[in-house]
């Protein structure tokens, strides 16, 4: 049975997180807020759970979900051959609205869909999301909406679209919390060099190039010579859903 929790109340938040952790363990889907939009999540290491997530959205295996992680040190456990440039972006913008497509660790026992040996990783800058990820570990997450519909900015919006396909809804109020326009994460392909933006979102190209000057734009264009200067931000100075589908969180 679907249950919704008001996570703005401390007791209900604790109960909701506990229920969500149990639901993930039972291969069910949950909805929770991120720093971009609301996400629908499932155990990243359960093929059954990932299949249910994709079915809830009306997606096929050709559009695998990204994976949200709780900490930067999880990066090397899930990805291999991480370029130094990608690591600098992660250190600068995680937690935050940046998704990195990387080569997946070949030893991992998971099935996210037709990823072609890649995985898209992100750390969200949201307390509820962080609390849930700390309890569950890596989660396969996509935006909490049916394909072709607007991404949900509240759990109630998500429930109107996903209904009984989700076990637990964690309501944390509007996302983004500041009332700004809802932007999904910026996606950067880091499986080869130079890095390339494949979806523009919450982190602008200018900010990316402030850390890694040679990042290509969505059309594969390099920066003008005048832009190709030394990074404006040192990698350790500002610690911060195959490509995932456009509706990823």
Image (cartoon, rainbow, N blue to C red):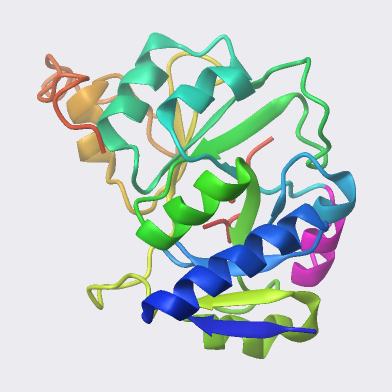
Report the number of numbered marks: 0
Point 83% across, 44% down: residue? 46
In this image, 212 relative to 129: left or right?
Answer: left
Q: Position of residue 143 (x, y in %)?
A: 58, 64
**Viewer-nearest residue: 249 or 2:** 2
Q: Residue furthest right?
A: 48
Q: Position of residue 5 (x, y in %)?
A: 54, 82
Point 44% across, 42% down: residue? 123
Numbered range of the magenta stretch: 51-61
Judged by its main secondary structure, the magenta piece is helix
Is there any visible trace of residue 9 in the rendered image?
Answer: yes
Q: Position of residue 71 (x, y in %)?
A: 44, 34
Above or below — where is 72 with respect to 186?
Answer: above
Q: Quadrant of residue 116?
A: top right
Is there any visible trace of residue 39 in the rendered image?
Answer: no
In this image, 79 relative to 87: left or right?
Answer: right
Q: Position of residue 30 (x, y in %)?
A: 66, 67
Point 38% across, 53% down: residue? 201
Point 9% across, 24% down: residue? 232
Above or below — where is 229 with respect to 35?
Answer: above
Residue 60 included in the magenta stretch of the image:
yes
């Amino acid at each position: 049975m679907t249950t919704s929790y008001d996570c703005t109340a401390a007791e209900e938040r604790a109960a909701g997180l506990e229920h969500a952790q149990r639901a993930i363990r039972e291969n069910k889907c949950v909805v929770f807020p991120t720093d971009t939009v609301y996400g629908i999540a499932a155990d990243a290491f359960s093929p059954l759970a990932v299949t249910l997530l994709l079915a809830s959205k009306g997606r096929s295996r050709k559009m695998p979900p990204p994976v949200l992680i709780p900490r930067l040190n999880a990066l090397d456990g899930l990805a291999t051959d991480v370029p130094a440039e990608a690591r600098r972006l992660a250190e600068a913008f995680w937690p935050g609205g940046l998704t990195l497509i990387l080569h997946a660790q070949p030893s991992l026992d998971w099935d996210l869909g037709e990823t072609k040996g890649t995985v898209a990783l992100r750390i969200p800058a949201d307390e509820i999301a962080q609390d849930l990820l700390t309890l569950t570990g890596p989660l396969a997450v996509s935006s909490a909406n049916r394909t072709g519909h607007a991404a949900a900015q509240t759990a109630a919006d998500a429930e109107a679209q996903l209904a009984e396909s989700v076990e637990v809804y964690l309501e944390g109020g509007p996302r983004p919390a500041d009332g700004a326009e809802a932007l999904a994460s910026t996606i950067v392909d880091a499986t080869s060099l130079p890095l390339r933006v494949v979806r523009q979102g919450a982190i602008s190209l200018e900010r990316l190039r402030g850390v890694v000057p040679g990042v290509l734009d969505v059309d594969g264009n390099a920066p003008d010579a005048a832009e190709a200067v030394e990074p404006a931000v040192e990698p350790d100075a500002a610690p911060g859903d195959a490509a995932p589908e456009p509706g990823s969180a």
